[in-house]
Image (spheres, coloured by chain):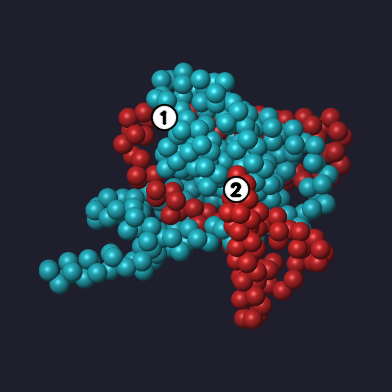
Amino acid sequence: MSGGTSLWVYLASTPLLWLAVTLTAYALAYRLFLASGMRPIVNPVVIAAGAIIALLLVTGTGYDTYFDGAQFVHFLLGPAIVALAVPLFDQARRIRRVLLPMAVALVAGSITAIVSTVGIAWALGASRETLLSLAPKSVTTPIAMGISERIGGLPSLTAAFVLITGITGAIVATPFLNALGFRDWRARGFAVGIAAHGLGMARAFQVNELAGIFAAIAMALNGIVTSIAVPLLVPLLF
Amino acid sequence: MGGRTLIEALAALLVFQLAGEFLVAWSGLPVPGPVLGMLFLLVFLAALRRVPGDIGPVAQTLLRHLSLLFVPAAVGVIVHVERIEAEWLPILAALIGSTVLTIAVTAAVFRLVVRLTGGDDDRQEEMVP
């Protein structure tokens, strides 16, 4: 028994354990996703993260210990964003044809995201710290955390909101856009990228490459617009 | 993918990211380093007019498994469970309501401007019913 316990203590402190757990949990979650016929509700990120959170709670492991191992996966986000240049280059002709629709939808979507988040939470009585942390929720984590810090929110709370937003977008986008009757992959991808950043983009790439590319452009542009718009809009809303 | 060009492609992605991070640290621009790295790689590809070596397959592999890369950050929600429990109604209503509204507004405005500017000639953009 004490041999087993010390073996666990040893393994739990190495990065290998939590790296292996992260990949295994995702691989199993992805199998479930495929087995369901790629239904958006069977989101592999939600299932994998949920299973890992349960495991951390059961074993009494802190997030810092977990992240020591998982950081190797997390690190690849940077090169993956750089890699987006390849599909952008391949599709440059199609993108150039819709520059004006992209520009107008970008501004409309960005402002809708900021004002509606803060408005709904304020109407339902959220605290001031929560409101400020919510404002940049539709942009990718590093940008959102930077904005949150600048306006007096809690950056790590903003990171949690960004994730819930991304997961919501990844789950609702397909059925919701179908229900509204949008069939243009460019509009669908762009909308998901504005509303739900990288997780929305990852979902869009699962569905259709063109949608994924437009989601990637939307995510990058919204990061820039939101970092200008939030510090201007938030003082007007309070 | 050949072994040598595979490593060259990975090195290229990291070097472009490094260049992006460097410019952000130096200039204080409110944009993440990898986004600038993406712009640099795009300019590089446009100058070459093609995607050299294994950059294409490596990029495709990374992007196909993009969801996996968000798992470690998603587990981070565990740190804020207490506040989210205490204010769950305004938080979830705001996040879900705003996400749905933003998707609808963005898609509708995009389609409206496409139709107004008459840019709807390519049927390939549409999903198969």
Query: In terms of depth relative to the viewer, which is nearer, A155 or B25?
Result: B25
Instruction: Return the residue at label 1.
Output: A129
Q: Position of residue A223 (x, y in %)?
A: 61, 42
Extreme front residue here? Answer: B26
The reply to whether discs 2 and 1 touch (Cβ–Cβ < 8 Å) is: no
Tag 2, which secondary structure? loop
Residue at 79% x, 32% y is B113
Front residue of A114 and A19: A114
- Picture colour for chain B: red
Task: Kindly identify the residue that appears in the image at 37 percent across and 61 percent down.
Answer: A68
Residue A186 disc label: none
Point 60% across, 38% down: residue: A227
Q: Is residue B46 left or right of residue A147?
A: right
Q: Secondary structure at mark 1?
A: helix
Identity, as a three-letter code, of the amino acid under mark 2: Gly
Q: Are marks 2 and 1 on the same chain?
A: no
When asked about the image quadrant of residue A195, the answer is top right
Q: Amino acid at mark 1?
A: Glu
Q: Colour of chain A?
A: cyan
> Label 1: few (<14), some or many (≥20) within 10 Å?
few
Residue A61 image point, x, y percent? 27, 55
- Left or right: residue B65 versus residue A161 is right
Which dot marks residue B28? Answer: 2
Quadrant location, the N terminus of chain A: bottom left
Q: Chain of mark 1?
A: A
Using the image as rendered, state which of residue A81 and residue A172 is in the foreground.
Answer: A81
User: Closer to the camera: disc 2 or disc 1?
Assistant: 2
